[in-house]
Amino acid sequence: SHTHDLPQSDRPLVLQEFLGPEGHVSNGVSTTSFLPSPGETALQLTLQLLQGGGIGVAQDHNHLAYLANLNFFYPIADEHSLNMSLTGLYGVHDEEAEVTSSTVSLDLLYRWKKDQYSSFLLGAQLLYADHEVDEVVNTKPFGYTIFAQYQISPRLYAGLRWDETDFLADDSLQKSQISPYLTWYTSEFFRA
C-alpha cells in the first residue's frame, strides 16, 4: 500500500528496515487464486515474480525477487473476523547471485465492526530474515509491530502502535518506538 493508504502516518519500523521507507514497490507479474476452504472461510494464494532491487532484503536490480503469500480469512461471527497471512520473500544482493536473503512474515488482524459508527482493529506483523550482508556476514534479524485502533465516531479513529526490530546489517542492534495516532476522515478519499 502507498503510505497515504495506511491507517497510520508512517510504516512500521520493521517494514522500513526490511523493505525500505516505501515498502517493496517494483514491476513484475502476479497471480492470485482462491483455494478450497471450509464453510464461510476464504483461502487465497498469491505468487509474484518481481524486479529485485531497492530494498534491504533484495538489493540487486539484475535478479528477480520471489514472493508467495497465503491469506486465510475466518468470519468468527456476524461482527467479528480474523485474517491470517503467511508471506515469504526471496531476494538477491549481488550480480553473481551469491549473497541472498529469505524473509518470512506472519500477519494477524482481528476486526470487530458493529456498524458504520463502531469498529475495533487489533493487528500484528512478525518478520524474520535469514540475511546475507555479504559473503562473510550472515544475520538473522527479527522484528514486529502490534497496533490497536478504535473508531470513536463515524469519521474519527484513535490508535496506538508498538514497533521493535533488529537491524538487517547487525542483528545485535535493535530499535523500537511507540506511535499514538488520531485519524479524521473528511471523506472516503481523504484523511488527516
Image: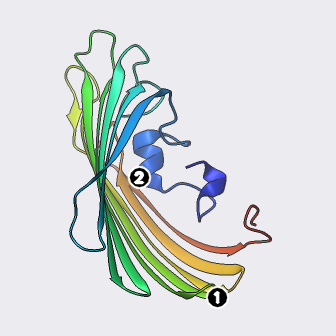
The picture quadrant where one finds residue 89 is top left
**Which of the numbered marks, if any, corresponds to residue 14?**
2
- Where in the figure is residue 168, as x and y percent of width and height? 34, 40
- Dot 1: element: loop
As drawn, 33 above or below 81: above
Query: Is 145 or 7 nearer to us in this picture?
Result: 7
Q: Is residue 136 left or right of residue 85?
A: left
Query: Is 141 or 91 nearer to us in this picture?
Result: 91
Q: Is residue 91 left or right of residue 146?
A: left
As drawn, 150 above or below 127: below
The picture quadrant where one finds residue 132 is top left
Q: Which residue is mark 1?
A: 117
Q: Residue at x 33, y 36 (%)?
A: 169
Q: Is residue 39 left or right of residue 167?
A: left
Q: At label 2, which amino acid type do we have?
A: Val
Q: Residues within 10 Å of mark 2 (few under 14, many from 20)?
A: many
Q: At label 1, which amino acid type do we have?
A: Tyr
- Dot 2: element: helix
Q: Spot the residue most to the right.
A: 186
- Where in the figure is residue 178, as x and y percent of width and height? 50, 69
Q: Is residue 1 visible?
A: yes
Q: Residue at x 38, y 78 (%)?
A: 81
- Where in the figure is residue 21, as x and y percent of width and height? 55, 43
As drawn, 166 above or below 177: above
Q: Spot the residue most to the top.
A: 96
What separation in Å lies between label 2 and label 1 (alpha carbons)? 31 Å
Classify the position of the C terminus by image quarter: bottom right
